[in-house]
Structures are given as C-alpha cells and as structure tokens.
Amino acid sequence: MKILVTGDAGFIASHIADKYRALGHTVVSVDNRHKKPVDINDADGLMKLFMKEKPDMVNHHAAIAEVLKSVRDPLPTFQTNVLGTINVLMAAGACGTVKKFIFASTSAVYGDPKKLPVTESAPINPLSPYGLAKSMAEDAIKFYAKLFGFKYLIFRYPNVYGPRQNPKGEAGVVAIFTDLMRNGKQPTIYGDGTKARDYAYIEDIIRANAIALKKGTNEIVNLGWGAPVADQTIFDEIAKNIAFKGVPTYAPYRKGEVYKTSLSSQKAFAVLGWKPKITFAEGVKRHVCETNKA
Ligand SMILES: NC(=O)c1ccc[n+]([C@@H]2O[C@H](COP(=O)([O-])OP(=O)(O)OC[C@H]3O[C@@H](n4cnc5c(N)ncnc54)[C@H](O)[C@@H]3O)[C@@H](O)[C@H]2O)c1
C-alpha cells in the first residue's frame, strides 16, 4: 500500500513511517523539515504531490505541536494545524485514491476534564489555541471524509515520549528532563510537582498506527493508560535511571497547560484491540537507555 505520512521528519511520525516501511508499505513523506520540503500550507504543492503519488492512505501528523507557543502566538498554530489540515484533506479528496485518513489529535481538546479517566464522549473544552485548533481539525476531517467518501480514524494521544523527541523544546518533559539531568543540569518543574498527565511510550503509539491501517472506521479513539503521572514522579523516575542526585527548581504554572488528565482507552480496546503495554517505569528505562546510545 502507498501511505502518505505528514510530519515524518518529527518525533512520532518518523517512527510510524519506519514501521510502515518495515511492514512493506511505500511511504510518501510530507514535512517542511526534509531536504525536499513539502509544506502543508502550500496547497498547490500538496495537490501536485497527491496527484503524482496517488496514495491509498494518509497519516497526518504534521503540526505545530507546542501548547505554549500557541498561547504566545496563536495564528501560526491555527494556520498550520487547521488550514494546513484542510489543504491535506482537499488534496486527498481531489486525487481520488485515498481510502482512509488517520490523524493525530490530542488529550488537550478536553482541557481539564471533570471526570478521569476521560472518555471520548466528554465535552470538548480546550485551554489553549493548540487544543482548539486540533478540535477544529477533527471537525474538518469528519466533514471532508464524508464529502469525499473516505474513512477516518482520529487518535487522541496522551503525552507521548521516547527516542527522537526533541529535548530542546518546551514540550516533551521526559526528553527535556533526561537531557538536562544527563548533563548535570537542574530541571524546572512548573507548579508544585502535582500537575499530572497520561504518558504513553512511543512503541505503543506506533502499534496503534499500525493497527489503524486495518481497523477503525470513522472513529475518534483515545490512547492512554487512564492514569495520570505527576511531574514529581517523572523527575524521580528519570533521576533514578540516570543516578542524578540533584533536586528540581519549582516555578509558577504556565498558562494554557492542563493541570490533570488521563485518557480512558477502553474504546481503543473495543475498536482496535489496542491496550498500552509499556508502563511508565519501563518506558523511562528504555528512553534513558536508547537516548544514551544516540
Ligand atoms: N508528542 C506528543 O506528546 C503529542 C501528543 C498529542 C498529539 N501529538 C501530535 O502528534 C503529531 C506529531 O507530534 P510530535 O511530537 O512528533 O511533533 P514534532 O514537532 O516532532 O513533529 C511535527 C512535524 O511536523 C512538521 N511540520 C510542522 N509544520 C509543518 C508544515 N507547515 N508543513 C509540513 N510539515 C510541518 C515538523 O517539521 C515536524 O517534523 C502532532 O500533530 C502533534 O500535535 C503529539
């Protein structure tokens, strides 16, 4: 099968593209960070590429994936994550060969849910332009999938961590803390350490994207453990694996960030037969080990 993967110069989709190739599929790359860049904001360029390649499926991960950036300067996030997604959808519809559209959405669409673990029927209540833009992109996907007659599968990811995550960004606390501690530097915890999210190791997310090639028709599906991991636990777990003896600095909470969330993956199990396998303790151990080799 020919699968067009967007965002495959980045953390998550680079692993997915590798997995798809390993399964024997042909991957068409779309990322503005590649040597031959294709920007999802370039509607004409995208259209030409789709017309030339005629993919069977699209896996759309390209996005500005930073909550805090979206709070400071929202328009680029809306441009790329909403209008860019519409460009990908229009090109997918026009080329006439796409049968399914897989999309990386986020737990950020729920904001701070009233009930944990959050299920897919909980209200959409984002706290950041990033979360709002993802929710708008979800609506656009449902709309265009119906219009063009292809299937969709939308994943609402928890926080994903593992090798290839950028340790120099503002998001990706496991990568950031690991890098700092490895270099003997003191990580900063925003808040008192009780802020907590659901964390999934990259391998579990790749597995879901492999299953998505065969299962899941017109569904929105959470992925996650259903249990929040606190910032302090993240610090302690990484420190243990790196034998870091320091302590964190504590700073005020940042606007737009969710305080506590976790995602029920009961639907993912019912629809896809997917459950997370790699516990946080195991994932951190692997992350520290894998990134040490890099
Ligand atoms: N990492 C997480 O914890 C997490 C959680 C929930 C959802 N997601 C979503 O998963 C996807 C991948 O996230 P990631 O962590 O790998 O981020 P990433 O920043 O590593 O990857 C995103 C990729 O998209 C590309 N991109 C951005 N703008 C583009 C444009 N205009 N045209 C073409 N390519 C463009 C970037 O160059 C980058 O390679 C994103 O859609 C993100 O919102 C990630």
Image (spheres, rainbow, N blue to C red):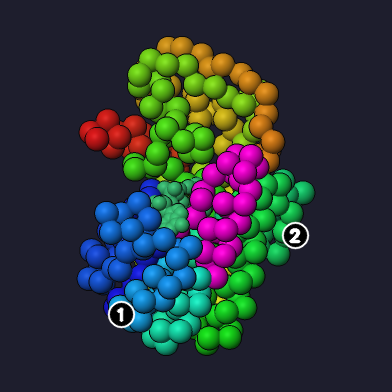
- Which is more foreground, mark 2 or mark 1? 1
Secondary element under disc 1, as helix, strand or loop, is helix
**Where residue 84 sits: x, y (%)?**
52, 64
Q: Provide the residue designation for mark 1.
A: 52
91 and 131: which is toward the camera: 91
| Residue 161 can be seen, yes or no | yes
Question: Where residue 20 appears, x then y in whole percent?
Answer: 29, 65
Q: Are marks 2 and 1 in contact (CB under 8 Å)?
A: no
- Indicate which disc residue 123 carries: 2
Q: Amino acid at mark 2?
A: Pro
Q: Is residue 138 left or right of residue 32?
A: right
Q: Secondary structure at mark 2?
A: loop
Q: Hey, which quadrant is residue 83 in on the image?
A: bottom right
Span shown in magenta: 61-86
Seen from the viewer's position, the closer of residues 272 and 35 is 35
Q: State the image coordinates of residue 264 (x, y, percent, origin top left).
A: 61, 55
Looking at the image, residue 73 lies above or below residue 28: above
Q: Is residue 85 magenta?
A: yes
Quarter of the image where one finds residue 222: bottom right
Q: Up-down: is 97 above or below 136?
A: below
Kindly identify the amino acid type of the residue bearing the numbered disc 1. Answer: Lys
For residue 261, the mark is none
Q: Residue at x 28, y 37 (%)?
A: 290
User: What's the residue at 57%, 37% (across, down)?
Assistant: 229
User: Dividing the image into 4 quarters, which one contains the C terminus?
Assistant: top left
Q: Residue 269 location, x and y as percent? A: 52, 65
